Image (tube, helix red, strand yellow):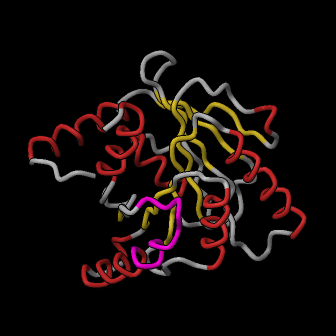
Amino acid sequence: MDVLTEEEKAARLERGRLLFAKHAEFLLGVVALKHLPEADMVEVSFAGRSNVGKSSLLNALTDQKGLARTSNTPGRTQEVNFFSLGKKGEDGLYLSDLPGYGYAKVSRSLVKEWTKLLKSYLRGRPNLRRAFVLVDSRHGIKESDREIMSMMDECAVSYQIILTKVDKLKKSEQEKILQKTKAEIAKNVAAHPDIIPTSSAKGDGIAELRAAIADLVYGN
């Protein structure tokens, strides 16, 4: 992104705030492409390892604590869950919560089905502007994250890394994992270079993520 003035930065953050001030609601969960909602609004998706904090992030973004269910049981999300923000024709937005991955107790057959669904979704969703891949800042990019990133590279889907739970790290540790992550994704063709550190508990990075999504809805 081009270097912005302080006034432009403030305006960009305000645009993101206004977008997510719109009413958000759960739309549907799908296990097959034929059940996908119409591709009539801009869409962004959220992917990440089980228990990385996707539900908490969605709740923080929309400022609705009960929008996305949170659970201490890894692998709870076993379908693509869609949420709508705003109304059609009013710069509305779809948010999709992809199945959690990287959990050893999930059967291989289920993983195979999830992978098939994800590839079909990523390749066949024309209104999908960006996928956000959530990575636990305490652990960094794991092999299962690399697999989903490779899948998105293969499907030519633009994706951006979101570091979660940064409140659990000291400032020096946050900077270290940020630089390490930037260096690793530099070789991934579909990866967006900007990484957003977040904390759903403390609110860190939420305004910046809202602004990044608003850029996709309205254009930079």
> Is residue 64 shown left or right of residue 119?
left
The residue furthest top is 89
Placement of 121 over or under 24, stated as above or below: below
Q: Position of residue 14 (x, y in %)?
A: 22, 37
Q: Position of residue 210 (x, y in %)?
A: 35, 44
Q: Position of residue 135 (x, y in %)?
A: 50, 69
> Is residue 113 shown left or right of residue 186?
right
Residue 94: quarter of image: top right
Placement of 59 over or under 20, stated as above or below: below
Residue drawn at x 40%, y 42% as measured from the top left: 213
Q: How many marks?
A: 0
Magenta region? 182-192
> Is residue 186 shown left or right of residue 33?
left
Q: Position of residue 140 (x, y in %)?
A: 48, 79
Residue 107: quarter of image: bottom right
Q: Is residue 53 visible?
A: no
Query: Is residue 180 a member of the stretch shown in magenta?
Result: no
Placement of 169 over or under 201, stated as above or below: below
Placement of 94 over or under 148, stated as above or below: above
Q: Is residue 144 visible?
A: yes
The residue furthest left is 6
Residue drawn at x 79%, y 38% as measured from the top left: 33
Quarter of the image with the C terminus is top left
Residue drawn at x 54%, y 30% as measured from the top left: 84
Residue drawn at x 54%, y 56% as measured from the top left: 54
- Assign the magenta stretch its main secondary structure: loop
